[in-house]
Image (cartoon, helix red, strand yellow):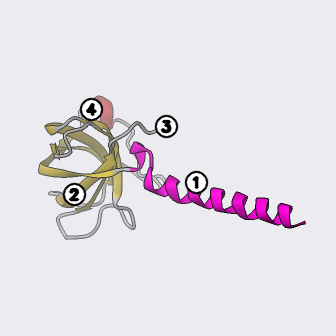
Amino acid sequence: MARVKGFRIWGVLIACVFWISSWVMAPAAWALAQVSLTDLSYEECPTELAEGAITSGGASRPANCFIITGNAENKTGKPIYNADIFGRVYDANDNPVMQNRTRLGSIDEVPPGVSDFELRISVPANQPTPLKLKQFKASGFTGTVRR
């Protein structure tokens, strides 16, 4: 009986050591890296992309298509994968274009240094331009991410 109890204690201790060490030695994909987004601008989509644009959500309504462009700066020295783009887009009257939504899209790969990016968004047709792009940033992983 005492032997069984001893094995049980050692088993629990070994399991705890593995569990704690898994936190310390996390895979590289867990390393979330920040990307600065600068020099933001936008333009209307080419007609072949804009044709039939509608808003997302419950009711489909006519929308205007825009391409947001800018520079993505990766200071990590390693490629960043699957970087989610966050930001706020306002119309000419300072009304939010996308209610309750700050994730706007993603960049598949951001190489080290400064690179260009673009992002397509749909804006309800009844919201006036010019658009205001605020608080843009991105974050992704320095390791490969399975999707």
Tell me, yes or no, if residue 37 can be seen here: yes
Tell me the distance, in whole angstroms, between the alpha carbons under discs 3 and 4: 34 Å
Select label 1 or label 4 by which is in front.
1
Q: Residue 8's quadrant in the figure?
A: bottom right
Is residue 54 rendered magenta in the image? Answer: no
Residue 28 versus residue 7 in the image, above or below: above
Q: Position of residue 18 (x, y in %)?
A: 58, 54
How would you rate the neighbour count of disc 3 (Cα within 10 Å): few for under 14, some for 14-19, many for 20 or more?
few
Secondary structure of the residue carrying numbered label 1: helix
Q: Residue at x 20, y 70 (%)?
A: 94
> Does residue 4 sit above or below 60 in this rendering?
below
Residue 146: mark in rendering:
3
Mark 3 or mark 4, whichever is nearer to me: 3
Secondary structure of the residue carrying numbered label 3: loop
Q: Which mark is residue 18?
A: 1
Q: CA distance from mark 2 to mark 4?
A: 26 Å
Where's the N terminus, which quadrant? bottom right
7 relative to 76 in the view: left or right: right
At 44% from the left edge and 39% from the top edge, which residue is drawn? 145
Amino acid type assigned to the residue bearing label 1 in the image = Phe
Q: Of label 2 and label 3, which has the lower sequence position?
A: 2
The CA span between labels 1 and 3 is: 24 Å
Residue placed under numbered mark 2 in the picture:
136
Between circles 2 and 4, the one closer to the viewer is 2
Instruction: Return the residue at label 4.
Output: 47
Question: Could you tell me the amino acid type at mark 4?
Answer: Thr
Q: Nearer the viewer, mark 2 or mark 3?
A: 3
